[in-house]
Image (tube, rainbow, N blue to C red):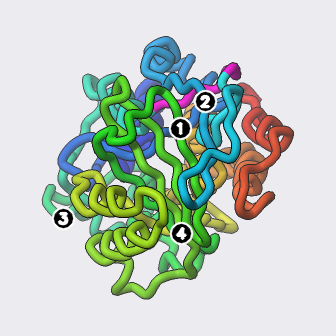
Amino acid sequence: MRTVLISGGGIAGPVLAHWLRHHGFRPTVVERAEGPRPGGQAVDIRGVALDVVDRMGLLERLSGVRTRMRGMSILDPEGNEVDRSTEATFSSGRLDGEDIEVLREDLVRMVYEHTRADVEYLFGDTVTSLEEDGTGVRVDFAHHASRTFDLVVGADGLHSTVRRLAFGPEERFTHHLGSYLSVFGTDNFLDLDDWQMWLRDGDAGFGIMPVRDNTELRVAFGFESGPLPAGLRERAALRERVVGRLEALRWEGARLADAARRAPDFYCDAMAQIRMDEWSKGRVTLLGDAGYCPSPLSGQGTSLALVGAYVLADCLARAAGDHHTAYADYERRMRPFVTANQALATENPGGPASAESVDRAKNGLSLDA
């Protein structure tokens, strides 16, 4: 039974662990957080990614926790409604479609609960070094004792530690898309009832949606900016910048700024893509955002993670664990799908991609190819 270390306990890593266990591998997941991470925006599961969760036996459960929006309003900078729709929302697309929108934390929790009985999890730890020889990869951890694994997979996000250790500095592969996104939760002070609000004011804007039976709001606030200097990318500095930008909004800026200032689940990061000529090096490979982040602007990050996890495990199983063959097949099968989905983020700057492009991208791969 081959051993596989997976760095990253979000979505891609545990889904990969499930399928590796299914195929007879022994996966271990290491995650920097102390447990499954709460918070985050609503995410979409679309097209072929629905087949992945269906094959995991989770489709019915995920459908039960999907968001239930009735529509959305588009506001001018003063908060006046200028348009509305009861057919679609910017976050999830058509409301009568087959795609599923769920809160990220619900998906993370569900996948963890589905895998924890037969997958080893190392929470509160991270990889600090990788040393490969002819038989495996020696992995040093910040807290646990060093161990040797047959294979290592980096599923640790946009700022992947595994990618940095195996391939080099992040700056080589990051393509900034000209904006930052912040997501945080707060009380439903707008009394929204399964209804979203979207507003743009100059080079900033937000979408607000109610969650948890309309008791809470999730705010997704974006603002245009080039790459920020290293000192301004720290969590506290980003929160201060977001609070200042929110305070400048003409409608509800003060209350939104106060919510961002106090939110325990505050998140902010650059809208960026990871573009690499190769996702694998020796016994190490990358999965999801670590190897091919499309950015939230694509709406396809979660689907790429789900599909990539399934395909990688399938390739390893077909190759009987021969990583040279498996990794080459993984890249061959996934790269056209990744390219099509990354293009959704750049097709229409400032707005969503066309419905035709989304349909082509989300269904652009067969799980059984």
- Spatial separation of the CA atoms under disc 4 and disc 1: 19 Å
Residue 37 relative to residue 248: left or right: left
Residue 99 relative to residue 130: left or right: right
Which of labels 4 and 1 is toward the front? 1
Q: Is residue 287 above or below residue 98?
A: below
- Residue drawn at x 35%, y 52% as measured from the top left: 184
Residue 251 x/y as whole percent: 47, 58
Residue 69 relative to residue 124: left or right: right
Answer whether residue 272 is visible to the viewer in this image. Answer: yes
- Spatial separation of the CA atoms under disc 1 and disc 2: 6 Å
The residue that label 3 is drawn on is 142
Where, quadrant-wise, is the N terminus in this rendering?
Answer: top left
Residue 16 x/y as whole percent: 47, 37
Range covered by the magenta-colored residues: 96-102
> Pointers 1 and 2 in contact (CB under 8 A)?
yes
The front one of 260 and 199 is: 199
Q: Which mark is residue 275?
A: none
- Spatial separation of the CA atoms under disc 3 and disc 1: 42 Å
The front one of 90 and 104 is: 90
The residue that label 2 is drawn on is 71
Q: Which mark is residue 223?
A: 4
Residue 41 x/y as whole percent: 44, 45
